[in-house]
Image (cartoon, helix red, strand yellow):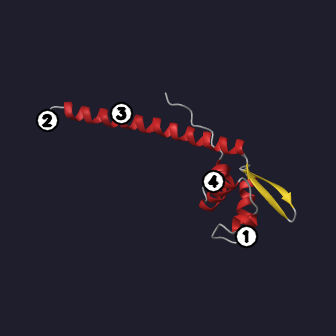
């Protein structure tokens, strides 16, 4: 019997799947917070592109933005990031179990072939 597949938040993983958004998360984690302008200075995309990426991250809950003058200041939501890490660990464990099962099947097939008398 196999373990049930872990519940995966596809929107969350779609958001994390983009390399620019992952870099933005890294920057926010290191710096504590940032605006589209401050992040844009460190990324090879326009400020407008940064703002769109931040909106995606905010929609899935990975960052939260608060008004700061004419801009918004963004911080990583630690609880949502922890949820993403837990999902990744769960998916990794499920795949490890699948791969172990495939390995056992392949080893059984190989032993069966070796034990079979040759013509």
Quarter that holds the C terminus: top left
Q: Which residue is label 4 attached to?
A: 16
Residue 85 in the image: above or below residue 63: above
Q: Which residue is at a point 41% across and 34% down the rendered structure image?
A: 101
Q: Which residue is label 1 attached to?
A: 47
Instruction: Depth check: give the residue in front, 43 or 88.
Output: 43
Circle 2: element type = loop
Q: CA distance from mark 1 to mark 2?
A: 70 Å
Q: CA distance from mark 1 to mark 4?
A: 19 Å
Q: Residues within 10 Å of mark 1 (few under 14, many from 20)?
A: some
Circle 4: element type = helix
Q: CA distance from mark 3 to mark 4?
A: 33 Å
Q: Which residue is label 3 attached to?
A: 104
Q: Which residue is label 2 attached to?
A: 118
Q: Which residue is at a point 13% across and 35% down the rendered structure image?
A: 118
> x, y (%) of residue 7?
63, 39
> Are the residues tagged 4 and 2 within 8 Å (C-beta)?
no
Q: Residues within 10 Å of mark 4 (few under 14, many from 20)?
A: some
Q: CA distance from mark 4 to mark 2?
A: 53 Å
Instruction: Depth check: give the residue in front, 110 or 13.
Output: 13
Q: Residue furthest right?
A: 69
Circle 3: element type = helix
Residue 77 in the image: above or below residue 6: below
Instruction: Depth check: give the residue in front, 50 or 112.
Output: 50
Q: Quadrant of residue 31?
A: bottom right
> Are the residues tagged 2 and 3 within 8 Å (C-beta)?
no
Q: Earlier in the sequence, mark 1 or mark 4?
A: 4
């Amino acid at each position: 019997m196999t373990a049930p597949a872990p519940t995966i938040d596809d929107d969350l993983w779609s958001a994390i799947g983009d390399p620019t958004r992952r870099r933005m998360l890294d920057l926010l984690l290191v710096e504590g917070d940032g605006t589209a302008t401050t992040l844009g200075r460190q990324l090879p995309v326009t400020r407008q592109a940064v703002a769109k990426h931040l909106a995606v991250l905010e929609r899935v809950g990975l960052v939260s933005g608060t008004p700061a003058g004419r801009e918004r200041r963004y911080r990583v939501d630690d609880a949502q990031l922890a949820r993403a890490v837990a999902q990744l660990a769960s998916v990794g464990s499920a795949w490890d179990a699948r791969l172990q099962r495939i390995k056992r099947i392949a080893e059984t097939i190989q032993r069966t072939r070796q034990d079979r008398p040759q013509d």
